[in-house]
Amino acid sequence: MNKKELAVALAHKTGIAQGKASEVLTALFGAEEGQGIIAEALSKDDKVAIPGFGTFGTRKRAARTGINPATQKKIEIAAKTAVFFKVGKTLKERFEK
């Protein structure tokens, strides 16, 4: 399901206009600077928990030494912040049945 299909489904489920549904999705999930509520919270190192669905968050990854598979030479991999999603209990149980 892509964003347009999700907007159509949201519009149908809630009775709002499809254009407004698309705006809501962008306001929640937009990844561009200043757009998405979730992305803005993650950039402030906050977690976003949606009970029953899951939690979005970030983790710091330390710098490390790796090996380039093409050349077998050691390379330095820089530290970074990674985004994660942990599935909520209710959603997880829905698919374990």
Image (cartoon, rainbow, N blue to C red):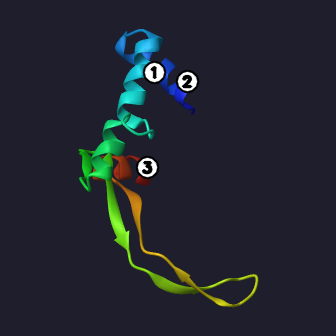
Pointer 3: residues within 10 angstroms few (<14), some, or many (20+)? few
Q: Whole-Å distance between the Cαs marked 2 and 3?
A: 25 Å
Which tag is nearer the camera, tag 3 or tag 1?
A: 1
Location of mark 2 (residue):
4
Residue 86 position, x and y percent, is 35, 57
Q: Determine the residue located farthest toward the bottom in the rendered image.
A: 73
> Foreground residue, 55 or 81?
81
Kind of residue at disc 3: Phe
> Foreground residue, 90 or 71?
71
Which residue is at a point 41% across and 21% down the rendered structure image?
23
Kind of residue at disc 1: Ser
Residue 68 position, x and y percent, is 67, 83
Residue 3 position, x and y percent, is 53, 29
Which residue is at a point 40% across and 14% down the rendered structure image?
20
**Sequence order check: which comes first, mark 1 or mark 2?**
2
Residue 95 numbered tag: 3
> Foreground residue, 86 or 64?
64
Secondary element type, mark 1: helix
Pointer 1: residues within 10 angstroms few (<14), some, or many (20+)? some
Q: Are marks 1 and 2 in contact (CB under 8 Å)?
A: yes
Location of mark 1 (residue):
22
Q: Whole-Å distance between the Cαs marked 3 and 1?
A: 27 Å
**Sequence order check: which comes first, mark 3 or mark 1?**
1
